Image (cartoon, helix red, strand yellow):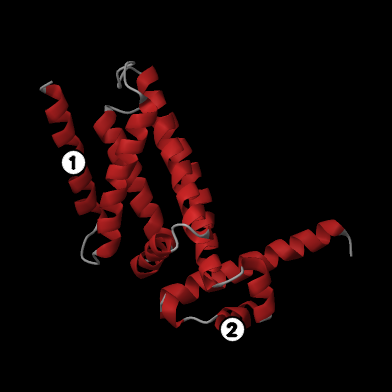
Amino acid sequence: MNQGLRERQKASRRARILESARKKFQDAGYVNVKIEDIANDSDVSAVTVYNYFGSKAGLLLALVGESDLILIRKLDELVTKSHENLISAVQEFGRILRQHAMTFLQKPTWREVISASIHEGSREFGKTYSELDDVLIGKMRDLLAALQVNKLVSPDVDICVLADCLFSLQNIRFFQFIADDTLGIEKSDIKLQQDLMALQAVFAQK
């Protein structure tokens, strides 16, 4: 068997395991799913799952990584679009995150992701999750840079600082959205818009 074929088979097994894990976490809940369940559904051994992902938490983190690859492409498209102003652009950034999150994983599974990122902050899961967030902050920075070019953000603004600030703000609203099963995307959009407008009004007085 040549190396190219082995790599394709390995990638196929990995994708099959991840898709099985995603569906089972959604249907049964993360805590109720065993590695053996995922292995049986993927037609591989439990040892193979452990070899690929190390643990059930590793599987969860890999799912987030897969999700972010798709999300990043959507955010790249956002950067190239024209925008009316800073508020509408950042509001759309947050909306894309929430809509994408709901197409890939459901709220209970995202709660497990957030919980694991907090509890394992200094370990591999927490560090890798933080690195994924850094990539998203970079996309916010790209958006602000495009807005600066189009004179929708002052050239005097440090967009690195502003990107971190605005991402943190929308991240708080994302956590609230994930925590509350009754909170929909539209209401979250409104809350983020109100946050941004309030900040704009404060700084306009300076």
Q: Residue at x 12, y 29 (%)?
A: 202
Query: Percent position (x, y) of residue 137?
Result: 42, 39
- Helix, strand or loop under label 1: helix
- What is the quadrant of residue 112 in the picture? bottom left
- State left or right for residue 25 relative to residue 170: right
Q: Amino acid at mark 1?
A: Asp
What is the distance, in whole Å, between disc 1 and disc 2 at their CAs?
A: 45 Å
- State left or right for residue 29 relative to residue 182: right
Q: Residue at x 30, y 22 (%)?
A: 153
Question: Vertical placement of 122 versus 157: above or below?
Answer: below
Work out whether residue 164 or residue 97 is closer to the camera in this orientation and state it: 164
Q: Quadrant of the N terminus?
A: bottom right
Q: Quadrant of the C terminus?
A: top left
Can the viewer see residue 164?
A: yes
- State left or right for residue 133 relative to residue 196: right
Q: Which mark is residue 195?
A: 1
Q: Which mark is residue 36?
A: 2
Question: Vertical placement of 186 versus 63: above or below?
Answer: above
Question: Vertical placement of 114 versus 201: above or below?
Answer: below
Work out whether residue 193 or residue 186 is closer to the camera in this orientation and state it: 193
Query: Percent position (x, y) of residue 85?
Result: 26, 27
Q: Residue at x 26, y 34 (%)?
A: 88
- What is the quadrant of residue 3 in the picture? bottom right
Query: Percent position (x, y) of residue 170?
Result: 29, 45
Which of pointers 1 and 2 lies earlier in the amino acid sequence? 2
Q: Residue at x 81, y 63 (%)?
A: 6
Can the viewer see residue 44?
A: no
Q: Amino acid at mark 2?
A: Glu
Q: Residues within 10 Å of mark 1 (few under 14, many from 20)?
A: some
